Image: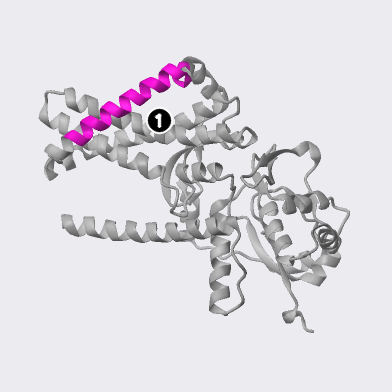
């Protein structure tokens, strides 16, 4: 059997000359699985460098959250992956790990180790000692670059953060703790009901009243208000995280998926808390937008000036739609709604599992492989994937119709 016919293993290897903190500092290398199994002894980081937290699933199974204390990276593992994690102590080769896995679970899929190593290595939670095999492969590794590519990469790598952010958020929370009390929740509900009633009543009778000329003149003000609303959205996540006693790792400005400029709050520390706390933190951001929209509707109803009133009606409607949109879970995006759904179903990494299942299912259909009955989780994966695909298609069609209607 030649090497091309043997199973291969992909490893994420740091590229020569790349800085440790750069997002594009890893390259993928393929190795013949037998060679890797003989030479590589992966090692998890030291016990004093990470924190592990067990979390329950809807099917009474357990998954684990591993947090790197220095980099604040997280890794979500099921029971089988956690077994692999424990076995990767730097003393056993991958062949040893595979043997132990087979003896424990009665089956073996080398791709499972491959996927686990990819994730753990990228999150800096597994160390793979450099071997002669890797040194030889990396000797001629180069990353093509042009001045345009460097410029784009520099723009995409923008990440402006507040200093001492957890301390600052703590001070704000101490002044606003009453916003997380039962009387405050009752007030939010009353404001939301009144605001939605006013908004619905207005648009049923009047519609959008601002002309295109005035819309363009008011556009800068509208963008500023949207920006402040986004800051409030993320601040609400951060304050809710502090309410449950966890830390806020960062608060700043970056590019979502390296494309869309956003304000963000890093509240991933809430994963070390309870499921209810995670649900509350995820909902806090959209809830702030719903309250702001309702308050804007009330202000618009009370203002005696037609132009200002119409502007606030428009702002209230747009904010309401954006907030409701962030609560929608099925778009293959990690929105607040997605995290709410994932935690409600007790299914971490729902999106990744759904994508993988859909891809494997489609490949099985194309290749006419025999298909076993779906498990309960797989029915959920299929429903999530199908709903997401339909939703993306409907969004594109709706966007085209709106553009054509206004041309």
Q: Secondary structure at mark 1?
A: helix
The image shows residue 352 at horizontal and vertical percentages of 56, 56
In the image as oriented, which residue stretches furthest toward the right? 91
Which residue is depicted at the point 52% across and 23% down?
Answer: 168
Q: Nearer the viewer, residue 219 or 313?
A: 313
Question: In the image, is residue 180 part of the stretch drawn in magenta?
Answer: yes
- Residue position marked by numbered label 1 in the rendering: 232
Q: Nearer the viewer, residue 112 or 275?
A: 275
The image shows residue 271 at horizontal and vertical percentages of 61, 37
Task: Please state, as top left, top right, bottom left or bottom right, where the C terminus lies in the image.
Answer: bottom left
Task: Please state, as top left, top right, bottom left or bottom right, where the N terminus lies in the image.
Answer: bottom right
Relative height, residue 227 to residue 26 (above, below): above
Q: Nearer the viewer, residue 344 or 254?
A: 344
Question: In the image, is residue 347 part of the stretch drawn in magenta?
Answer: no
Query: What crowding class fits label 1: few (fewer than 14 Cα within 10 Å), some (14-19), or many (20 or more)?
Result: some
Which residue is depicted at the point 53% across and 54% down?
Answer: 351
Q: On the rendered structure, is 404 left or right of 141? A: left
**Which of the 4 quarters of the picture holds residue 128?**
bottom right
Q: Nearer the viewer, residue 279 or 175?
A: 279
The answer, for residue 164, to whether it is visible in the render is no
Which residue is depicted at the point 27% across and 32% down?
Answer: 196
Relative height, residue 307 to residue 37 (above, below): above
Relative height, residue 237 to residue 132 (above, below): above
The image shows residue 402 at horizontal and vertical percentages of 22, 55
**Which of the 4 quarters of the picture holds residue 249?**
top right
The image shows residue 46 at horizontal and vertical percentages of 80, 42
Q: In the image, which residues are magenta?
A: 178-201
């Amino acid at each position: 059997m030649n090497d091309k016919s043997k199973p291969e293993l992909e490893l994420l290897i740091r590229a020569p000359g790349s800085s440790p903190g750069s997002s594009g500092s890893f390259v993928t290398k393929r190795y013949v699985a037998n060679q890797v199994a003989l030479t590589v002894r992966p090692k998890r980081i030291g016990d004093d460098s990470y924190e592990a937290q067990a979390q329950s699933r809807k099917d009474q199974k357990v998954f684990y959250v591993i947090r790197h204390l220095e980099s604040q990276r997280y890794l979500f593992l099921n029971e089988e992956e956690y077994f692999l994690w424990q076995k990767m102590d730097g003393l056993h080769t991958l062949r040893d790990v595979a043997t132990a896995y087979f003896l424990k679970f009665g089956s073996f899929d080398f791709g499972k180790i491959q996927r686990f190593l990819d994730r753990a290595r990228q999150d800096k939670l597994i160390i793979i000692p450099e071997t002669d095999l890797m040194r030889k492969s990396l000797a001629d590794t180069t990353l093509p670059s042009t001045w345009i590519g460097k410029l784009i990469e520099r723009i995409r790598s923008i990440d402006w953060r507040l200093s001492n952010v957890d301390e600052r958020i703590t001070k704000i929370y101490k002044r606003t703790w009453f916003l997380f009390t039962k009387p405050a929740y009752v007030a939010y509900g009353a404001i939301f009901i009144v605001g939605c009633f006013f908004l619905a009543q207005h648009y049923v009778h009047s519609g959008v009243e601002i002309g295109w000329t005035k819309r363009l003149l008011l556009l800068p003000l509208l963008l500023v208000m949207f920006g402040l609303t986004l800051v409030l959205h993320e601040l609400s996540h951060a304050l809710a995280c502090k309410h449950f006693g966890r830390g806020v790792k960062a608060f700043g400005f970056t590019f979502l998926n390296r494309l869309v400029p956003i304000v963000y709050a890093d509240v991933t520390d809430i994963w070390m808390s309870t499921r209810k706390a995670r649900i509350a933190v995820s909902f806090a951001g959209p809830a702030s937008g719903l309250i702001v929209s309702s308050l804007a509707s009330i202000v618009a109803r009370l203002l005696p000036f037609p132009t200002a009133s119409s502007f606030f009606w428009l702002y209230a409607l747009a904010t309401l739609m954006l907030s409701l949109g962030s609560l929608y879970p099925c778009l293959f995006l990690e929105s607040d709604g997605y995290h709410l759904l994932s935690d409600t179903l007790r299914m971490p990494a729902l999106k990744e599992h759904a994508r993988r299942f859909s891809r494997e299912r489609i490949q099985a259909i194309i290749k006419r492989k025999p298909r076993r009955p779906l498990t309960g989780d797989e029915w959920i994966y299929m429903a999530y994937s199908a709903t997401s695909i339909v939703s993306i298609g409907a969004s594109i069609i709706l966007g085209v119709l709106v553009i054509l209607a206004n041309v």
